[in-house]
Image (spheres, rainbow, N blue to C red):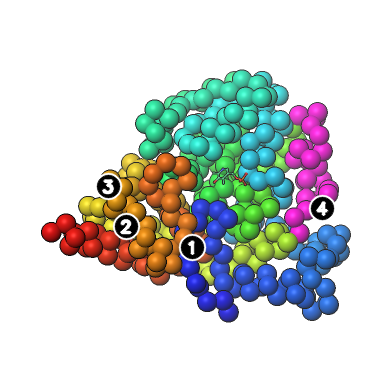
Amino acid sequence: MNTILKHNFSAGPSILPPEVLDGARKAVGDWLDQGLSILEVSHRTPEFRAVVDEAEELIRELMEIPSGYSILFIQGGASTQFSMIPFNFMGRTGKAAYLDAGFFSKRAIAEASHFGLVDVVASSADSNYTSIPSDYSIDPSCSYFHCTSNNTIEGSQMKSFPSSPIPLMCDMSSDILSRTIDVQQFDLIYAGAQKNMGPAGVTVVIAKDELLDNCSSKVPAMWDYRVFRDFHSLYNTPPVFSLYVMLLNLRWIKQQGGVKEMERRNNVKAEILYRELDSNPMFHPTIVREHRSMMNVRFSIDDPEMASLFYEIATREGMVGIKAPFGDGFRVSLYNALPLSSVEALVNTMRESHDAIKCSSF
Ligand SMILES: *Cc1c(COP(=O)(O)O)cnc(C)c1O
């Protein structure tokens, strides 16, 4: 078993359970004891077909997805979905509604604008995305409404979803499988695997069949959801290894007690961390309380010298991936696989840094 060398707070690709890494290592050597590595097996073999089938079944079971939804495995990351969605669905009315709550929703909006008119229903850009707009209405003459459940860069999270008069599409890249959601509220959910599902290389799409039946017909095969559905995600060569490691991670989630148990653990981790952020005067959480993410936590330290001291101590303690992606400040990610002990170590480091600075200022 792999011993943990680092406290991995990376936002993506991110931490995977040691059991999953062990399984991946084994499969690279000799997969299913058949004298072949998973890296050299055809995706057309019954053994690999079984991987795709089981991954699909487990997602269906873990997320309680009812019949009438298809589960597709696509490449190109969540970023490809930014164009795949409008390519397939915007044509119906020529316009689509988007909620702008952060970096990735802005990217989704930019891509959609290549395909038609984008109606931005609300934006929190003016307040630096420190909250998620909640007061808006969705124009029923748009083809669909798009939102981002968790803003990975900013550290904000939608706690509930609007009832939409038009198909609801959601980018759940950074909080899928971290909390229970009602899939039936959505027409299409997508997530790049590398945040909370597995390694980079595969994107999961959960889509209502009724929606897919009404796709635009003039879409190239690799952008056509129906091709992925008709070929059971095996129209072309899928990301074989990524899919396999994702399957190992799905099995791990189930074995640990499923999404409910993940949610319980994630709540505990986030609560401990936010409690420290709220009580330690050295740190300032960035996001308004009611929209704070349970997955990605942003905070700042006013004094740059204090900030570098904190960073130094944290690095010495083996913490990685804690710097904010843009600008100053910090972001730590608390995905499913991050153990409580890593959060406790971080909180201890925060207290240590605060004490060290208090002492040195006297
Ligand atoms: C990471 C991320 C993306 C981009 O994903 P890629 O797989 O790198 O294309 C999009 N949306 C959200 C919410 C993300 O966290």
**Amino acid found under the numbered disc labelled 3:** Asp
- Which stretch appears magenta? 216-240
At label 3, counting other C-alpha atoms closer than 10 Å, the crowd grade (few under 14, some 14-19, many 20 or more) is: few
Image quadrant where residue 350 sits: bottom left
Cα separation, mark 2 vs mark 3, equals 10 Å
- Foreground: disc 1 or disc 3: 3
Q: Earlier in the sequence, mark 1 or mark 4?
A: 1
- Closest to the observer, 113 or 6: 6
User: To which residue does mark 4 refer?
Assistant: 237
Give the main secondary structure of the magenta stretch. loop
Cα separation, mark 1 vs mark 3, equals 25 Å
Q: Is residue 134 left or right of residue 95?
A: left
Res. 132 in view:
yes
Whole-percent x, y for residue 175 in the image: 51, 51
Mark 2 residue CB less than 8 A from any atom of ligand 1: no
| Discs 1, 2 touching: Cβ within 8 Å | no
Cα separation, mark 1 vs mark 4, equals 31 Å
User: To which residue does mark 3 refer?
Assistant: 303
User: To which residue does mark 1 refer?
Assistant: 8
User: To which residue does mark 2 refer?
Assistant: 309
Cα separation, mark 1 vs mark 2, equals 19 Å
| Discs 1, 3 touching: Cβ within 8 Å | no
Picture quarter with ligand 1: top right
